Image (tube, rainbow, N blue to C red):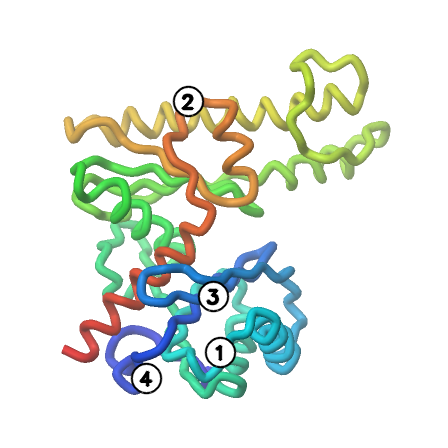
Amino acid sequence: CGGCEGGAPRVARMKRDGMLLAIDVGNTNVTLGVFDGETLTQSWRLATLKERTADELGILVGDLFQARGLDKASIGGVVVASVVPALTGPVCEMIATYFDRKAVVVDPTADTGMPVRYDSPGEVGADRLVNGIAAYERFGRARGIPIIIVDFGTATTFDCISARGEYLGGVICPGVQISADALFQRAARLPRVDVRRPDRIIGKTTVGSMQSGLFYGYVAMVEGMVARIREELEGDGTGPACCVATGGMAGIVAAETSVIEAVEPELTLQGLQMVWARIGAKATS
């Protein structure tokens, strides 16, 4: 689209002083963050509505900036990761119109600093790649160990980074809310329930039994998948893999299991900042 930039060659056109606006367009939420250097100073979450126009987004984001006393002119660069193609164009148009900037859209085929070993690199979601970059830089590089990232989003994804900092691939599972909705829609006598930790595993009511199955079944799935992934990742003798969680239920699930070693709610935004820092540095060198 006219407001988007992909890859390093055109980034030099962007003003690099000032702050960075990072935008993660996910299936459930659009997350925005403002960085001053490497420090995330502000963040917001908007519901993902595919029919939103560039003008609607511009008004919403402008109101958010105004509420926090931020000047849009202070934004010197914008980086975007999107897994919702219908919104990528409007987001880029919004940035061009309301911020007078060209958004850099993260592409797994670009030089992000992390080699992608997927059979078809272009199939990797940008959010999964930037999560891997942030988690490896924070927990893997200095220790020389592989990383597993569990992202509790609309889908639950497990992404695997080698001890050398390569994106190897991963696993995609239905998110817990998808499972809850499927139970409600496909079983006539089962009600819609909130997904939360029940007081006991053995349910004494239909709702309690469903909550137990959804929550503890989900925890068990995470434990089982991480154990199996670790067997493959650690087969080359590089040391124990570190498991990092992000996404809506990360903290709740992490409290129930020892397989998750760190919870990073803003991992995707952190990864976007790291990608921007690398691309910008290359463009101005």
* Type of amino acid under label 2: Ser
Please identify, in this view, whether the residue under mark 3 or under mark 1 is nearer the observer.
3
* Type of amino acid under label 3: Ile
Is 227 placed left or right of 53 in the picture?
left
Looking at the rendered structure, which numbered label has been put on residue 23? 3
Residue 162: where, in percent of width, then height?
A: 23, 41
Marks 3 and 4, the one that precedes in the sequence: 4
Residue that appears at 57% across and 47% down: 154
Q: Are marks 2 and 1 in contact (CB under 8 Å)?
A: no
* Type of amino acid under label 1: Cys
Q: Mark 1 points at which residue?
A: 92
Q: Separation of disc 3 and disc 1 at Cα?
A: 10 Å
Q: Mark 2 points at which residue?
A: 258
Q: Separation of disc 2 and disc 4 at Cα?
A: 44 Å
Q: Separation of disc 2 and disc 1 at Cα?
A: 41 Å
Q: Name the residue under label 4.
A: 15
Foreground residue, 113 or 190? Answer: 113
Residue 146: where, in percent of width, then height?
A: 24, 37
Marks 3 and 1, the one that precedes in the sequence: 3
Q: Is mark 2 on a helix, strand or loop?
A: loop
User: Is 93 placed above or below 277 here?
Assistant: below
Q: Separation of disc 3 and disc 4 at Cα?
A: 17 Å
User: Is 283 placed above or below 206 here?
Assistant: below
Crowding at label 4, few (<14), some or many (≥20) Cα neighbours within 10 Å? some
Residue that appears at 45% across and 24% down: 223
Foreground residue, 51 or 140? Answer: 140
Please identify, in this view, whether the residue under mark 2 or under mark 1 is nearer the observer.
2
* Type of amino acid under label 4: Lys
Crowding at label 2, few (<14), some or many (≥20) Cα neighbours within 10 Å? few
Marks 2 and 1, the one that precedes in the sequence: 1
Residue that appears at 37% across and 50% down: 131
Marks 2 and 4, the one that precedes in the sequence: 4
